[in-house]
Image (tube, grey):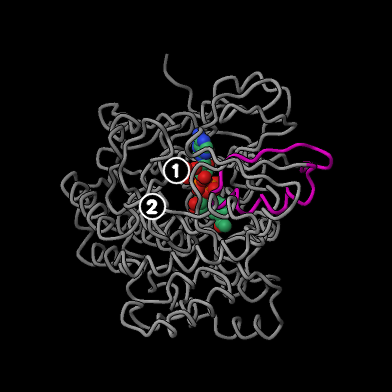
Amino acid sequence: MATEITDTADAVIIGAGFAGMYALHRLRDEFGYSIRVFDRADDVGGTWYWNTYPGARCDVESVFYSYSFSEELEQEWTWTERYPTQPEILAYANHVADKFDLRRSITFETSVAEATFDESNNRWLVTTDRGETVTATYLITAVGCLSEARIPDFEGIESFGGRILHTGHWPRDGVDFDGLRVAVIGTGSSGIQAIPEIARDAKTLNVFQRTPHFALPAGNRPLATEEIDEVKANYRRYRAICKVSPSGVPIVPPIGSVLSLPDDVGRAEMNRRWENGGTMFMTAFTDTSRNEDANAVLASFVRERIRDIVADPDTAESLTPHGYPIGAKRICLGTDYYATYNRDNVSLVDVRDNPIERITERGIVAGGNEYELDVIIFATGYDAMTGALTAIDIRGVNGLRLRDEWAAGPRTYLGIASAQFPNMFMITGPGSPSVLVNVIVSIEQHVDWMCDLLSHAEKQGISRIEADLDAQNAWVLEVNDVASRTMFVKANSWYLGANVPGKARVFMPYAGGIGPFRERCDKVAAEGYTGFTLT
Ligand code: N01
């Protein structure tokens, strides 16, 4: 039986987070395309819609974690804190949706289940879980890099008599922890933000830690009016810096090689940056991201701070990261994170050597002890970068399935296209810098570059845009090569898929920085979209 088509569009966009919203705005309002956007949430915001856990905040400074495409938007929105809270970012997303009238093109509470490329007419056939079937010239995935939440497959989990939560799917009406015995499993960015907040309210908090992460003080604070005014007056200059910088934010320049500087000078700089808070601690020196001896200096400074802050020496030792370079796992920013372990109601359960054995009706069993609990919070992360894409049954030419093609690791050209999946574009796909940089700068670059390509295709009467296999193979090699020269490959992390049992161990993001990536993409465009076949 022929599939009944319920709608026809120029493009289907999957996801109404920051990537989907910007792609919608450009393609609908500038190109005049007919667009259907689908999102499983009941409103815009993507990651910032779902991550409403206590303490959720971005670790990119607010004034730079924002769109640059509209000067009017820049001037009318005023951030209140150095690092924006989740409610403030979501309010910003809502403001953008209102201002550009985005919601009328978005179908909420609807997931895309399948997308199949039809070679007979070079169109995608997109099916939702609500029974819609839309054909579109282009399929644009804006599904987020950290949106497929993961709960490890612990034995007995279904028998737990209390409440189970994941930081990435937090209840919208909040959770009252007053008087409750709570566990947090996981001490990555989400856990490190949530733990101090939950500790203030819960009766007891047990933190189950497998690998200690390096946490730096965020140094969050309200923004002064003069600071806001200065940024607003100079936004064009700041945005230009963000666009060409490696990480998508203006950086405080390094002062030199830590191995060459006198010890007291290096130490003073680390102290200064630690006190100031934020990730600029990581860029204090020129050599710490490539040279392990230099990196060890930075790491041992943080280890000393942990010992200074945490009163109990055994707990301090358990919280101290060893065995991998600082920055190899995503650096975390916290507020009172280490000091939280000095509270009487907080205990660290080190499950590195004694993993969680099972979950029972009453709680968690680890190291032969049963911890009785009312709530278990999984801060256990995501099937990152690929999980949300492979969850959709995407089929390219000859019915090839994306999830099969990527079984040994994702394969893309420039993180934006994949051979044999014509007319499909991934915003912040694997192979792009996205998660290693200010993601909004990355999103704008991807969407703008894709828009230029679509405009070129339209002018040339091209109906099929496909990445070449050779170009893709070369890009995959380059992504791996760039990563192999960094510290990122020296730890288990979600960048490598290491947090998902059975997932191929491949470094997924492009570690060369957004500035160099932009140059590379611009060169491809200037040379007539080399590495693509346009027919
Ligand atoms: O997830 P994670 P996340 N038993 O994967 C542990 C972004 N983000 O949600 O390290 C016991 O980092 C796991 O242990 P280990 C940011 O990019 C940004 O915290 O694998 N423990 C780890 O401790 C970030 O990197 C912001 O040994 C288990 C934790 O769970 C990304 O999202 C805020 C386990 C997972 O850490 C993901 O962060 C929040 C098991 N079986 C998130 N399985 C900001 O902008 C996993 N773990 C500030």
Report the side of 70 relative to 80 (left or right).
left
Closest to the observer, 147 or 257: 257
Q: Is mark 1 within 8 Å of ligand 1?
A: yes
Closest to the observer, 333 or 60: 333
Above or below 50: residue 260: below
State the SS at label 1: loop
Q: Is residue 487 visible?
A: yes
Q: Which residue is rendered at x = 40% and y = 69% of the image? A: 297
Tell me, yes or no, whether the two marked residues, 2 and 1, touch with CB atoms within 8 Å.
Answer: no
Residue 39 place in picture, x, y as percent: 57, 40
Residue 148 place in picture, x, y as percent: 51, 38
Q: Quadrant of the N terminus?
A: top left
Q: Is residue 381 visible?
A: no
- State the mark number for residue 384: 1
- How many residues crowd mark 1 within 10 Å: few (<14), some (14–19), many (20+)? many
Above or below 247: residue 427: above
Q: Earlier in the sequence, mark 2 or mark 1?
A: 2
Report the side of 279 relative to 180 (left or right).
left
Residue type at tag 1: Ala
The stretch in magenta equals 174-203
Q: Circle 2 is placed at which residue position?
A: 323
Residue type at tag 2: Gly
Cα distance between the residues tagged 2 and 1: 23 Å
Which quarter of the figure has residue 371? top right
